[in-house]
Image (tube, helix red, strand yellow):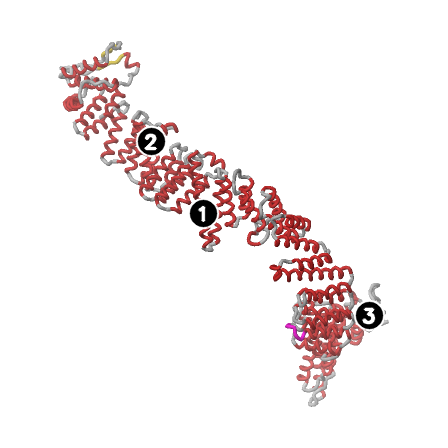
Amino acid sequence: MKGFVCALMSSILMPLPAAAQESFRIELGRDGETIADMRPVFLKFESRPMPDISPAEVARRYQQLFQSSDEPAVRIDALNRLTNIRDRTGQDMGFSPEEEERVYGELLSSYEAILGKGSFGGRLDELLYQMAKAHAFTGQAEQSIDRLKQLVGLYPQSPLVPEARFRIAESDFSAGQFAEAESGYRALINSGNAGALKAKAQYMLGWSQFKQGAPAWARAGRTFLSVLDEFLPDAQSLQNPQTSAVDTIDDTFRALALMAARNEGPDTLVAWLEADTPRHWAYLLFDRLADLYAVKGDYEASVSANQRFVRYHPDHPKNPAFMAQIAAVWEQAGKPDKVRAAKADYVAMFGAPPSYQALSEPDQARWRSFSRRLADFHYTQGTLALAQNDEAVGQGAFSAAATYYESLASRTESAGQILRLAGDARLQAGAYLGALSDYQEAAYQSDNYPEAVDAGWAALVLLRDGLEGDRRTAEFRPDLATVSAELDRFNRSFPDDSRLPGLTADLASRWFASGNPESALNYAGQTVTNSYASALERYAAWLVIAKVRQSQGEYALAERAWTQILQVMPEQDKNDSESNAKRQLATVIYRQGEAAAERGDVTGAVEHFTRIEAVLPGSEIAVKGRFDAANSLLKAGQWALAIEQLRLFRTRFSDHELATGISDKLVHAYVASDQPVLAANELLSAASTAAEPWPLQLKAAELFHIAGDQGNRDRLYRSHLKTNPSAVDAGQHVQLQTMRHRLVKSGDGAGDLRSAMVASELASPWHSDESLAWSARAALVLGARDAATFASIPLSQPLADSLDRKQRALESARARFLEVEQLGGEAVRSETLFRRAELYRVLAQDLMTSSVPLDLNELEAMQYQMLLEEEAFPFEEKAIALHSDNHRRLANHGYDAWIGKSLGVLAELNPGRYSRSVRWMTRKDHKPSSGGPG
């Protein structure tokens, strides 16, 4: 009812256009019998000034007119005027609500009568509106909506249309016809003249879309966003919203959160929001969604909503509240692990200095509280894990604790204490560089920290432990200079600390071990002069002094120093330290022997090396001294004395590992002293116990060869070849061929050895000039042997049998000569061509001179002889062809004996062409072969 009245007031009291105020006309009926039946004519009325009268007086007169008139049109017009005055001025028109409802009920018949006549002196849109209102007052909702629809259809430009559209849409919404309601509200909004109803229409449009279900929620989301844009146009409106709009705004947020929760959650909100420019109120929407999830007990979704906003707007000033709210949600859910994780995220997000400084003071206090709680928790967890030997978990926990402590230190007043805790955590985590930095800052850069001396000592001990042992890692590798600088710093700040001498003594030993005798003597001197130094610390310092003398090469002085140390050594240390001191004494004696050997003083070196045994009898260094005494003699070339010492060493220390090299040294000494047979026998003796004897035995064979002892050499060669060795490299191949060659020269089993030599050379991928020459000569000998066998086979009857044997012998010889060519190349080709040609010539000759079967008559014998000549002819032609090939070599290779022999044969076979008296000319750079003519 209130809405109707407000809309009506705004439309009726709207100022009229200027033209309407100046003049207007109405039609009166010309033919009607009564005024109601008359058709309008045009009468012109001029505008006149409005009388000066108060609204209350005007309302009183219209009320009096309404009560006294019996004309429906007059009564309706008077009521309209009263309503307009009330809406415009806010003054009571004289009717109570009950009277107004009764009045409108009585006027319904008047409205119907006027509409039935089709003529009305006032505005028909107002009449339809009043009829709709009257129907509404009397409970006739359907008729009221029909009149409003009639108003919209007939008078679309009427100022009453916006409220009519709104009422129609409201009716559809109430009836559950949400699609129709959506259309109505949208038509009102799009009309451009919704006025004050626009915000309400947008709000109800959103609800109409929402009520249509999930398919329409995308539209509903956009609509509700526009509602919020309308009610919250700027940031200031968030602080002071309109009181009348608070419920609408809250309900809009609720609707959006409900739709998002039933869809994709925060991603749905992001999809809606990203379509337009950023909204300053967007964080409230995510907050409402997170609250909705939390109330429903869906804590995971609530956290996700908070996180999604932070990702959506990473620089928003409300992000600290969202991150803190995540921790609160998990706490509400009873999830302590996730509470800690949320606090960790909060600390990480705002830990950088610019981010921390941007926080408000309460947020900074929350950050410090979260950091300290997280640090203490992880420290405790690390302690528990290490107690259970779970090193990986423990170190991880301590590392996390240290990170929180370090970030917190500069933001608290107890920086020294926090940094000391951080250092302890880093130490337990194995992050020694971080621990060192924390300790140093706590000791030297934290004001008024009462335990600074302990923090400084912790840094010093950590550096010392980092020199070696468990504290030394790939990342943490402090050197002595760093430790010494830290010690000097500590000494300047805390000179009266009683723990200093132990560390200075330790550094003295370390500096000496690192090769810096000056620093070693410096810290050793600090130790012996410190009044807090214990007897053991002083003794350690004197040890360093002795070692420095030793390291400087003053071995005689060092020998006397170690002798003195043995005399002054504390009784409680003698069990272990005395033997060590004796070893050092033996060492400096040994060094004196080395120095003498380097100077070339062999006699002095041997004397020092051999007297070590008196200090530490049976010790390793004494054995080594004996060994080096022999080596010194060897290096000096004193072979007889060296051999004596080596044999003595092997006799006395046969089980010592150094004895394994004595045989090699004896072989060297024997060879160097020109005793190859003794060296070979020494090698054979060593080979008798070796896992792989043949390398030693072959070396012995070579020595026998050098000594001219062919018997022992060939015995070893034959034994080795019987094992059918195969070469694995070029060296071994040449070695095996050399054995075969030497055995061939010795004349023992030459035939088989030649065959093996040729086969091995042909099969091997490795060759040398010598192995090829040896193998070619062996193949040539074998070929000549086969050729002789071939020539010795007579062709007798039956001819087929003897010819088959002879041809097989020919093929064997021919194959050997081809092997000779393969191995010897051009150097032997003239000879092989000649020998191959001769095989065919001999075969042809033997065929033609073979016997004729005795049972043939003279004619048959002549025919048989002709057949033999025909058979022999191809072989003779082959022989001529091969000798001719040899002849043709003259052009490129010059004359040699075998070419000369081929020419001699050709002269016999083809005298017309080759039997000439010639003098062979050779190239200027070619020497005639010894086999050629003079």
Q: First in sequence: mark 2 or mark 1?
A: 2
Is 48 drawn above or below residue 388 in the view shown?
above
Looking at the image, which is closer to me, 509 or 828?
A: 509
Return the x and y of residue 861 as percentages of the image width and height: 71, 86
Residue 227 - label: 2
List the residue tagged with mark 1.
378
Give me the C-alpha separation between circle 2 and circle 1: 48 Å
The mark closer to the camera, 1 or 3, is 1
The mark closer to the camera, 3 or 2, is 2
Amino acid tagged 2: Val
- Name the quarter where the N terminus is drawn: top left
Return the x and y of residue 419 as percentages of the image width and height: 51, 42
List the residue tagged with mark 3.
929
Amino acid tagged 3: Ser
Amino acid tagged 1: His
Looking at the image, which is closer to me, 762 or 63?
A: 63
The mark closer to the camera, 2 or 1, is 1
